[in-house]
Image: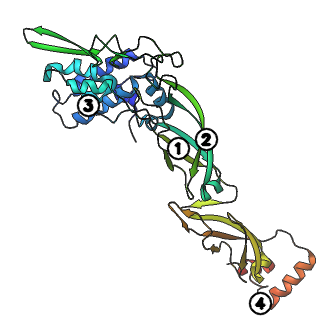
Amino acid sequence: MARDYYEILGVSRDTDKEEIKQAYRRLARKYHPDVNKEPGAEDRFKEINRAYEVLSEPETRARYDRFGPEGVSGAGGGFQDAGDMGGFADIFESIFSGFAGGMGSPTQQRRRSGPARGDDLRLDLKLDFREAVFGGEKEIRISHLENCEVCSGSGAKPGTRPRTCSTCSGSGQVRRVTRTPFGSFTQVSTCPTCNATGMVIEDKCDACDGKGANQVTKKLKITIPAGVDNGTRLRISNEGDAGQRNGPAGDLYVYLFVNEDEEFQRDGINILSEIKVSYLQAILGCRLEVDTVDGLVELIIPAGTQPNTVMKLENRGVPRLGNPVSRGDHMLTVLIDIPNKITPEERELLEKLAKIKGDRTGKGGLEGFLGNLFK
């Protein structure tokens, strides 16, 4: 199980953004591979970067607080090069520019201001037992970011276009070189003019207030495959949040949870249930209709059936996920109902039967006889 991101940075869950940044700076200096050569330092450094990447952005932090690591599975892919590190590249370069003369080539800088893939979203969906067994179509409601239809995602008022930021020349970053007797140090920070986008919108779109996207609630029909179980994950492509600067949308991940059934239980692709019969039905045998996920099915109880006998109805279980033609079995455990009280007529008949069987003496009378029947 992944470690908690707050624990990785050593901060509490109500810590503000500035304290998170300070904690990241302190730990990044300590575990950077150019500084710390101890085994595991590089993995620790990557872990710290990932934690800061999620917690430094209000939106991804909110999703993490609500859903945990699965809720931010699309927010970055761990430590890569500075151009792919999103919100903390400026801090990273500021700290470690002295080691390698500054990181982030012009190509990497331009990549930050280009199209960015949208975030993945998670939805938990509950299913009834039979819905999970047979699958089918399900309607869900989601809320996600969609590109603004008025400005086509640019954020600029129709008829206008964003212009390249003159402060950073479209890189989204500004650099400041400080010369000291010990050498030159380069500090890289987010461009204050364009806020790292590389573009400036002079006339904002009224429909989205210049953001290029709006939060939209919509209905979707999704197909539930037959045989799904607790924890099954469905991926719905391009139904996550819209990407920034006309980047591709993220995906929607639907996690399935199956409600318990009063009658049936599941064991892999087999279904388990119980059936109760009278002691006379067990002794003499009978035909009964039993409930299955397919409806009522006739079951033959052989004469002399013992308590807790397990009987099998073939191909009445759960379809195999991905191969619905193949199904498991329905396993029925036979419970025998021995009454606490019987009528005088019933007792007389049973005592005659016990006498015939020779079990009246030394076996506890009628009770011993009945007990011996179902050893």
Q: Quadrant of the C terminus?
A: bottom right
Closer to the eye: label 4 or 3: 3
Residue at horizontal 32%, vertical 18%? 198
Residue 351 at what x, y percent from top left? 85, 83
- Residue on which the image places disc 1: 254
- Residue on which the image places disc 2: 140
Label 4 residue SS: loop
What amino acid does circle 4 point to? Gly
- Residue on which the image places disc 4: 358
Q: Is residue 206 above or below residue 314?
A: above
Report, in whole angstroms, how far the alpha carbon at label 1 lies from the one at label 3. Answer: 31 Å
- Whether the residues at callouts 2 and 4 have beta carbons within 8 Å, the answer is no
Dot 2 or dot 4, earlier in sequence: 2
Outermost front residue: 159
Closer to the eye: label 2 or 1: 2
Report, in whole angstroms, how far the alpha carbon at label 4 lies from the one at label 1. Answer: 65 Å
* Residue 368 in view, yes or no: no
In this rendering, position of residue 27 left or right of residue 177: right
Q: Is residue 148 above or below residue 296?
A: above
What amino acid does circle 3 point to? Phe
Tag of residue 45: 3
Report, in whole angstroms, how far the alpha carbon at label 2 lies from the one at label 3. Answer: 40 Å
Residue 194 at what x, y percent from top left? 35, 14
Q: Residues within 10 Å of mark 3 (few under 14, many from 20)?
A: many
What amino acid does circle 1 point to? Val
Dot 2 or dot 3, earlier in sequence: 3
Outermost left residue: 181
Residue 276 at what x, y percent from top left? 74, 69
Q: Nearer the viewer, residue 343 or 21?
A: 21
Residue at horizontal 41%, vertical 10%? 202
Closer to the eye: label 2 or 4: 2
Report, in whole angstroms, how far the alpha carbon at label 2 lies from the one at label 1. Answer: 10 Å
